[in-house]
Image (cartoon, coloured by chain):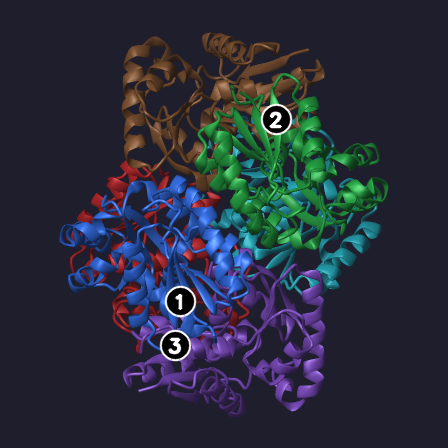
Chain colours: A brown, B cyan, C red, D green, E purple, F blue
Amino acid sequence: MAVVIINPNSTASMTEAMLAQAREAAPGLAFEAWTSTEAPPAIQGAEDGAVATPPLLELVQRAADQGADGIMIGCFDDTALSEAAALASCPVIGIGQAAYHYAVMRHWRFSVVTTLAVSVPVIEQNIAAYGLGAFASRVRASEIPVLDLESDPAGSAKSVLEEARTAAAEDDIHAVILGCAGMLSVAQDVQASLRIPVVDPVWCAARWFNWHQA
Amino acid sequence: MAVVIINPNSTASMTEAMLAQAREAAPGLAFEAWTSTEAPPAIQGAEDGAVATPPLLELVQRAADQGADGIMIGCFDDTALSEAAALASCPVIGIGQAAYHYAVMRHWRFSVVTTLAVSVPVIEQNIAAYGLGAFASRVRASEIPVLDLESDPAGSAKSVLEEARTAAAEDDIHAVILGCAGMLSVAQDVQASLRIPVVDPVWCAARWFNWHQA
Amino acid sequence: MAVVIINPNSTASMTEAMLAQAREAAPGLAFEAWTSTEAPPAIQGAEDGAVATPPLLELVQRAADQGADGIMIGCFDDTALSEAAALASCPVIGIGQAAYHYAVMRHWRFSVVTTLAVSVPVIEQNIAAYGLGAFASRVRASEIPVLDLESDPAGSAKSVLEEARTAAAEDDIHAVILGCAGMLSVAQDVQASLRIPVVDPVWCAARWFNWHQA
Amino acid sequence: MAVVIINPNSTASMTEAMLAQAREAAPGLAFEAWTSTEAPPAIQGAEDGAVATPPLLELVQRAADQGADGIMIGCFDDTALSEAAALASCPVIGIGQAAYHYAVMRHWRFSVVTTLAVSVPVIEQNIAAYGLGAFASRVRASEIPVLDLESDPAGSAKSVLEEARTAAAEDDIHAVILGCAGMLSVAQDVQASLRIPVVDPVWCAARWFNWHQA
Amino acid sequence: MAVVIINPNSTASMTEAMLAQAREAAPGLAFEAWTSTEAPPAIQGAEDGAVATPPLLELVQRAADQGADGIMIGCFDDTALSEAAALASCPVIGIGQAAYHYAVMRHWRFSVVTTLAVSVPVIEQNIAAYGLGAFASRVRASEIPVLDLESDPAGSAKSVLEEARTAAAEDDIHAVILGCAGMLSVAQDVQASLRIPVVDPVWCAARWFNWHQA
Amino acid sequence: MAVVIINPNSTASMTEAMLAQAREAAPGLAFEAWTSTEAPPAIQGAEDGAVATPPLLELVQRAADQGADGIMIGCFDDTALSEAAALASCPVIGIGQAAYHYAVMRHWRFSVVTTLAVSVPVIEQNIAAYGLGAFASRVRASEIPVLDLESDPAGSAKSVLEEARTAAAEDDIHAVILGCAGMLSVAQDVQASLRIPVVDPVWCAARWFNWHQA
């Protein structure tokens, strides 16, 4: 079958962008991408995550029942990741989880640049729960709402870049992780202007399935 | 309104037993109790917990919308506790969470006696996530399936007591926490035969709402 | 008998204020309040805490011998809390301990606003020792000496509020804990001007005894 | 160029076996394998690791200078991993590191079955340093010396399997990690007789380079 | 002046034995030794420690006031160590603290063999609070009451040795720490029969003052 | 024989300065000092540390073979400390390790003032690996290159002092640790102008050998 990317929010254009990005990142693998149509248009903070959980788990169960080779949770908050993994025998990877582990395995100390401050505690708790807190310097908010990343990519890239530069200057780090699935629209611009590696979480999660033997 | 006890599994007799226990524990408070009818009959391990999460969160949302004074998640695994709490502005308490914090605030080092081994990793991860791992000695399985607690209370009490005695003898502890909502059927018998305190999680969670000012 | 509030410092007016606050918070419980007359007038930093420990433990022993239903250590530093708890079979609660656990059980990430910088390391060590460091953002000093809280409540409230506002703006938190028993004089003013909950530690500790079954 | 597998011990037959295993695991990648001829014939415990470090780092430097696409440290102790990574801009992966991260990303709680007890503290410290201690149950010694794995594969497989079965029965785990590069000789036999997944560290590390974009 | 050894229990013969041991361990330093006459005859568990704290802190204050060059808390529980240190500007060292740090600085993973099980949680909490939990394997009780160490040294040595041997065989350690001030009576016998180093806490604490420049 | 100070960098004047400092700190002990002539002139960051490791371990092995009474790793990064300790049965002490443990045993919360930002992650990882993170406030870079400490002691002292003053003002600490072997040239000047203790790591490590019984 394929690796199913599940976008836990209901914005289909983000689902499409993730699918294109995954296919580019891991051309040898088959991907399809589903949108959680009953969910909020963006997941910003713990409450949005909770509302998005039931329809997400339904899709996870469906993908598992259909024999998915793998499942990617396409939100940097790794929405309901452990619950999703318990439903499926195939690998279930969150894009945040993939980015942190990749950075840590490269021996990189990192900061995260995410969208709004309301997501910061969620991300910090995830990193701590994965045991990787010692490798993270700071989780920083660029104060760009998720949906602005699509509607105003140029303005968004500027704000994200500014925060990423501050991180590179102040945080004693080797890499910056972009903390939102929607940031792949700005990833190239940010990388072009930054002297340290920029980790795109969708790229990381897509290529992860090359590790696992399908 | 009232404190709503939500049983994340579909066994209505357990819901009724929790409601009776809560009313006895905190007679000054109003309780009602709901059963998650779409869930498995018992939650044993991470997979059952994942399946039980979507219908549970629906009930949590409904309780919050109806103006519940508080919400109690009636499973010792604290199923989807952080997601549930993000949906409601009233207090949302898990019965496991209540039991651990009560023991720790009494300066008690504790062990847990639960049902099946498949629940042990879930419980250990919860204790660690709450930051309370240093106060827990061991999580022990009595190998009693959840539903046997109702169908064979005498036999179950004997097995639970045996494991609790081993814990008291070997684990350098001050208290034993009963690690299943269904264990209130055996709590009195176990306490009667044990020299250290036995903490019933439903009792703990029900009385907790006396702390909070309704 | 009653719950005995022990003020580990020798300022009797603070004892009286705590007693009044406890009675208002938990009207169904009997409280009395004792002052540790051999102690310093305020406990600011580790040295004051050490000097205050012996007369405090004497009072704790006396309260336990007289059959107290509970003991509240009325200093936000939770002076000698574990030693006190080891002397008594009844519950022994510190007002700092109560505030942290309450916040954590409400799923609140918090900052503390205390009096002088000399108290910051003591408070940080307590939070770490209770295992709750992951839920605390920052411990902040308002640079108000303890006794100014009584002598200049208006000026103190202003300084505490200013620091609390900074915490709310910068610390990614859901609540502010007031880090001094004497701050109940300013708690209402601060809450009135802050958009997130303000946790008063004496209130928290007094109502805690409604959790425990006397 | 290629991914260079560096065997930090001087037993060339182990190097050859790792190379064959890597080529089978990741057929799309180019591998070569070097033996650290100045090192001890096996690395058992911290002292062997220290003696093996200088010639290992020399080889790492040489591989980096020659433009290796990646470097794999072929000892489960992840000998001098952080020092090696600091010398090279390409990815440097330890086979132990790869196995732990893979298990954790699959949401598996694991135990390790290694060779001699003298290696247990080294492995436990590595797991702790990577932040993954919460996901590891136990590190177990089968008391098979490293070189017996080659000279007596049948007898070794029996001992390793016995310890792996005990782990599966007692440790509340989802997977067993084989804790020695030399165990690939027994991996298939062990997996064939065990009901939970067996993770081979060389397989894990070889396929990891499919994650990274060469 | 001198380093003052304060025995927090009231058994003067233990005080004398510690003084003799300290003088032998650090012949270039001046020691005197005080007995806390108001304390219990032995400190076994948290309650004894709490009772012993007030008279201990009085002696610490007196030693500080008299210009002590250093203060040694002569109980392996490090009774009231942080409170004692806050009272004095000279170094204040606990014998448990000294033993753990010495072992850790020698790169030794250790187990502790103490007297009764009631002391185990106290010791485990101390090790955790000092940050050294990762270096400790187990805290083991020999079930010898403190005062038997003096009244029956031969029998005690046998029991302590047996537990130390079990530790050496099972705990993956480099050293055994004797977990009681009174164990210096058996230290030589135990060391003579054990293949790994035995750390005597009084020796460690006495010589520590050679580190500090008086 | 003697305690051998090994300077892991190739700047012989730093070796000489350390030797003089050690002899002054611990006049009763015999010291000699070796320079690692194959190493970089200064160790700034992880890459320098990795390059310096092989020649350092060779010298450690030589010292151990010649019967050294002790070995001091004379770089604040504690270069290859655990590998070095595994090679020798005598004590092997890093100057950073000695400084942290000394501060912690004095019950001091500390900050470190080091040279360049590139060293900050290395130092932070060491403190975390030793378990002492809870006692460290911040690791601060003065942006003085190591070799400037010798070539421009006056200017260096000014920059180090400025950063140390900021640490004393902002970090809630009891002591400042100078985070470079080369800072002994500025230690006296900094201490003279600072109100809290300044810990020199070479002094600390030299005197440590008075603890151990040669």
Chain that bears disc 2: D
The answer to whether any part of residue C69 appears in the image is no
Q: CA distance from mark 1 to mark 3?
A: 14 Å
Q: Nearer the viewer, residue E130 or B48?
A: E130
Q: Which mark is residue F105?
A: 1
Whether C77 is drawn above or below F9: the answer is: below
Q: Which mark is residue E210?
A: 3
Q: Residue A123's quadrant in the figure?
A: top left
Mark 2: secondary structure: strand
Mark 1: secondary structure: helix
Residue located 51% across and 10% down the image:
A24
Indicate which label's residue lies in the foreground, 3 or 2: 2
Q: Residue E191's quadrant in the figure?
A: bottom right
Whether E42 is drawn above or below B159: the answer is: below
Task: Classify residue C189 as left or right of residue E200.
Answer: left
Residue type of the residue flagged with mark 1: Met
Q: Which mark is residue D32?
A: 2
